[in-house]
Amino acid sequence: MSYVANNKTSDPGLAAVACLGLVGVLLALSLVVAKLASQAAAPPLGFLMVSMFGAALILLVVSALLLRAPVVLNRRTLEYGVVAGSFFAIPNAIAFLAVPHVGAGFLSLSFAFPILLTYAIALGLGIEKIRQGRVMGMFAGLAGGVVLSLSKLDIADGTIFWIVLAMMSPVLIAIANIYRTLRWPTGVSPVFLAALMLFGGAGALLPVLVWAEPGVVGILFSSTEILALLLTEITIFSVLYVFYFVLQKIAGPVYLSQIGSVAAIVGTTVSVLFLGESLPAYFLVSAGLILGGTVLFQRSNPA
């Protein structure tokens, strides 16, 4: 029986709400750490790849030794790791490269967009049904993200390229959300799948890294500050992507995509309070739209 058939749309309950909040907060914090690493002159792609690989090793050990989950390596799981990892690596690489130019707050806000795109794809594939509350909620969240995005367009012209590039990420994230659901291997634990995705993402970045950032390992390990940030990012990734997969398994891809709304608010707030970024214009209006959209979405979950 397929994953989709085993995960009929239902009220996911408090466990899903707790996972949603945790994953959204950790996603925002991962971008904040990326911004701090950039300020410390860490090579962005190398920092991302080593963070992925380190977290993947930790999750593999947790899955195999602590949880004693079966290590399933076959054509299906290897495909899953490579494809899911590539869809994961590209948006993250864009984010890590763009964060010095557009700020962690703006990147956090861009994660408010995948919810609408994921829902649209899921409707087209018959995974979801049209529900008025969900549609209203997602358009409210999208409107909040648009308002905040437009508020960044008064910055220098050279940054427009990075804004456009950053806004490509939500499309890839939405496709990845659906792919992971449709191709979820039967009988494989979320922790092991998270490890596979992170290994796949690190592998996808390796050729680019060799070309674009030679000598990256020496740079990453030459500074105590960068090493501390690297260990912090590995820890965040290890926790984040376990609960990311748990949330997808218990609640499905559309519910999962709400993490962007949480990340948008948390990331912007943290960036303003601790990174010295300016508060975007109309932040309260945008935050109200995003939070209101999330509430509408939650209330529309069927009994």
Image: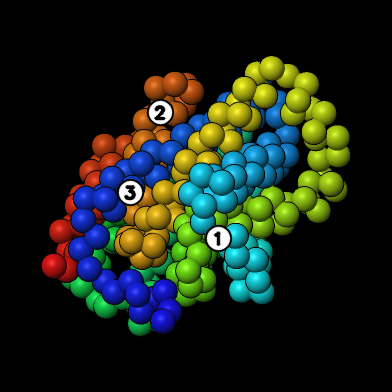
Residue 13 in view (yes/no): yes
Q: Are marks 1 and 3 in contact (CB under 8 Å)?
A: no
Residue 161 in view (yes/no): no
Q: Residues within 10 Å of mark 2 (few under 14, many from 20)?
A: some
Q: In this image, 231 relative to 177: left or right?
A: right
Q: CA distance from mark 1 to mark 2?
A: 39 Å
Q: Quadrant of residue 216?
A: top right
Residue on which disc 2 sits? 270
Q: CA distance from mark 1 to mark 3?
A: 27 Å
Q: CA distance from mark 2 to mark 3?
A: 18 Å
Residue on which disc 3 sits? 20
Q: The residue under label 2 is which amino acid type?
A: Val
Q: Position of residue 15 (x, y in %)?
A: 26, 50
Q: Are marks 1 and 2 in contact (CB under 8 Å)?
A: no
Q: The residue under label 1 is which amino acid type?
A: Pro
Q: Position of residue 126 (x, y in %)?
A: 35, 82
Residue on which disc 1 sits? 70
Q: Earlier in the sequence, mark 1 or mark 3?
A: 3
Q: Quadrant of the C terminus?
A: bottom left
Position of 122 relative to 255 (above/below): below
| Callout 1: SS | loop
Q: Residue at x 51, y 32 (%)?
A: 32
Q: Residues within 10 Å of mark 3 (few under 14, many from 20)?
A: many
Q: Are marks 2 and 3 in contact (CB under 8 Å)?
A: no
